[in-house]
Amino acid sequence: MKSCSDIIVIGGGIIGLAIATELAPVGMTVTLIEKGVFGGEASVAAAGMLAPLKEFTKPGPLLDMGICSLDLYKNWVLELKEATGIDCQLSTAGILTVAMTDMEEEWLQERYQWQKSEGYDIRLLSGKEVQKQEPHLSKMVRQAIYSPHEADINNRLLVEALVIQAKNRHVRLFQNTAVIKLKHTGRKMTGVVTEKGELEANHVIVAAGAWTADILRQVGVNVPVYPVRGQIAAVDSNHLPLSHVVFGKNGYLVPKQDRRIIVGATEDLAGFDRSSTVYGVSKVLTGAMSIVPAISEAPFLQAWAGLRPATADGHPILGPVPNWSGLTLACGHYRNGILLAPITAKLIAEYVSSDETEHMNPFLPNRFSLVSSEEK
């Protein structure tokens, strides 16, 4: 296997797939390489929430990026459905963020005040008003913020749709293919060596999630990305209809159109261990039961875990590696890779086609010192 492309994307999760499908129509030949199966790591281990007002705790560039990406989603999945025939089950029912104690009410009020002052369309509901919307919620729920424009999606179907779209756009796809080495002449990237052979390219984009640091370390680039395990579970929703995503201090519940409710999630520093633990799963289920007690009677379906790519400052790392030619990063999205996939793809494509980095300024790799003491 030896061939040449304009661009190689390393990493076949939602971020890598989104970037590859965004780049292909602008006349570039694109190859995507995934060490396992497409979307097999963090992308399928998520609940699929598209909830920037829940995930980000203050105004700033990360929240702005999340809102912008959420705004792109409706047209993005519509285009995917038209091109692939796959309905990614985007739900736009909105999200309820609930408070059940004095301390949680204080937390909720603080969140409501700054989000309202920033002009976001949110509503503060009393306990009775929340119960009307979701009768199965605990009677302990005192207040809730309703954000009608936040959403969720079936992330597994999204992966399937992106793979088909990539094929439609003539992206060369390799899965179960590990990258062994990055090829370069001086500080100019020239391709990769995989376990199945060499691939040449003028530009390499590393979108390998929690594994990004391992790939870059061999060329003397230290990327502050590390894995955080998220344990998650699914129960049958047959006898427990929920109309909205419900988000609380002790966890969240995400009803899906395929009759599952996804409940989550832990945040464990466990290295690259993807095991589900008794403690982790019990914590997730206990948190869900405190918010919706009736879930205790729901049939249990599955538990699993994924490794989320966290960064030293909590922000994704997007853009060119300083002092290198043809080496770009798109990593560190932590819990929000699915939410941020459309905007990440657009920003990376904009940079690759025009060298424009203005819109990525808060997320550029140059905010870190990336040079290691030893370059191999």
Image (spheres, helix red, strand yellow):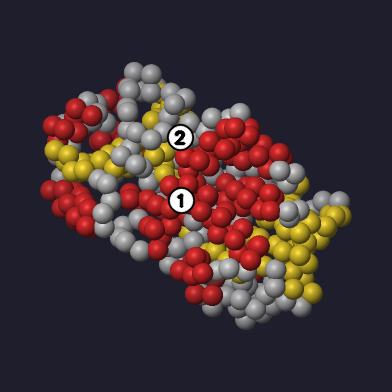
What residue is rendered at 63% in x and 50% in y?
A: 22
Observer able to see residue 164: yes
Q: Which mark is residue 69?
A: 1
Q: Are marks 2 and 1 in contact (CB under 8 Å)?
A: no
What residue is rendered at 65% in x and 63% in y?
A: 352
SS state under label 1:
helix
Residue occupied by mark 2: 90
Q: Quadrant of residue 324?
A: bottom right
Q: Which of 163 and 218 is in front in this view?
A: 163
Residue 221's place in the image compared with 92, above or below, is below
Q: Residue 235 carries which label?
A: none
SS state under label 2:
loop
Q: In which quarter of the image is residue 248?
A: top left
What residue is rendered at 78% in x and 67% in y?
A: 190
Q: Earlier in the sequence, mark 2 or mark 1?
A: 1
Apparent side of residue 305 relative to residue 243 in the rendered image (left or right): right
Q: Residues within 10 Å of mark 1 (few under 14, many from 20)?
A: many
What residue is rendered at 44% in x and 26% in y?
A: 257
**Which residue appears farthest toward the bottom when viewing the image?**
373
Amino acid at the residue labelled 1: Ser
Q: Quadrant of residue 205?
A: bottom right
Observer able to see residue 233: no
Residue 117, x across and y down, in percent = 22, 57
Distance CA(mark 2)–CA(mark 1): 14 Å
Amino acid at the residue labelled 2: Leu
Apparent side of residue 267 relative to residue 28 in the rendered image (left or right): left
